[in-house]
Amino acid sequence: MTLVRLIQCIGVMVWAVSGKRKMYSGKKIIYGKTHRKAAWKGIYILLLVGIFLMLATEGGVEECIIVGTMILLVSGVSWGIAYFRPGRAENWGIQIAGGFSVFFLLLLFAVVWAVSVPEERGREEALAQLPLVQADYREMTGEPVSADYQYTESILGSRLCGMVEYGENRSEDNEGETDRLTYEVYRSTHPWILDEVWRRETDSQALSLGEENVWDALDARYVGEMQGTGILYVRWGDAVLVLSADAMPDEGQMRVIKEKLAL
């Protein structure tokens, strides 16, 4: 809707300039016809259908519901203004109050949705999407008690974030023993972006791993103890891996990790 409004604004500005010239020269001014309103509504519908098709293709059911709710709320405010035709001052007040109301309702909806989704369901969905868990490269006892998966992509590159925690279900009286794995994979065809990621992620405390041949990488560093908890940094020409684990992988396990993450 913002995009269409901006296009309309540019069109009105062009019309105003040309209209003044016509008015001063005594020519007839054209104020537009009703079929243009139908054309703009058609553009709205096409844009909204495109958004829903994109979200449906990606399996974003929750996003479709949120966007649909947003459309109904904003359309309701717009319809109310068009129907009751308030004065200019009242119009501004209704738009501001309506905007805050829409924001509050959407925030409330998002919170209720997040709370209502069972934790077990979220864990199972994350595990189904995660390309790497501890059990892929070493023997594990117990089951995953927590998992998270996030993936973002743009024209500049992509970022994959994964987290898996094995162990006992913790309670107030029992902390339980856990084994946690967290990793981030940055990919880009632009070297300067990966240079910035590498500079930001590593620091002067990161030591050379001396295992570059295992990863077939440009650089590999770590912080911590290689036999225990630590953070691993690996840089390729088109990707950067940041891996944090309670038990760092050995040489054979590194090869499995590289294969699982397609690095």
Image (cartoon, grey):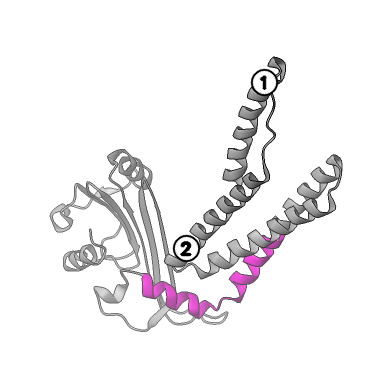
Q: Quadrant of residue 196?
A: top left
Q: Residue tagged by mark 2?
A: 53
Residue 42 vs 119, above or below: the answer is above
Residue 226 vs 164, above or below: the answer is above
In the shown orientation, is residue 98 left or right of residue 187? right
Q: Nearer the viewer, mark 1 or mark 2?
A: 1
Q: Residue at x 56, y 82 (%)?
A: 173
Do we see residue 76 in this rendering?
yes
Do we see residue 100 in this rendering?
no
In the shown orientation, is residue 248 left or right of residue 52? left
Q: Position of residue 183 (x, y in %)?
A: 35, 61
Magenta range is 104-129
Q: Position of residue 207 (x, y in %)?
A: 26, 48
Q: Residue tagged by mark 1?
A: 22
Closest to the observer, 208 or 45 = 45
Q: Residue at x 31, y 44 (%)?
A: 194
Q: Is residue 101 magenta?
A: no
Q: Residue at x 36, y 47 (%)?
A: 201
Q: Position of residue 22 (x, y in %)?
A: 67, 20
Which of marks 2 and 1 precedes in the sequence?
A: 1
> Distance of mark 1 from mark 2, alpha carbons?
44 Å
In the shown orientation, is residue 176 left or right of residue 12? left
The amino acid on which the numbered mark 2 sits, given as a three-letter code, is Leu
CA neighbours of label 2 inside 10 A, class few (<14), some (14 to 19), many (20+):
some
Q: Position of residue 137 (x, y in %)?
A: 24, 73
The amino acid on which the numbered mark 1 sits, given as a three-letter code, is Lys
Closest to the observer, 7 or 169 = 7
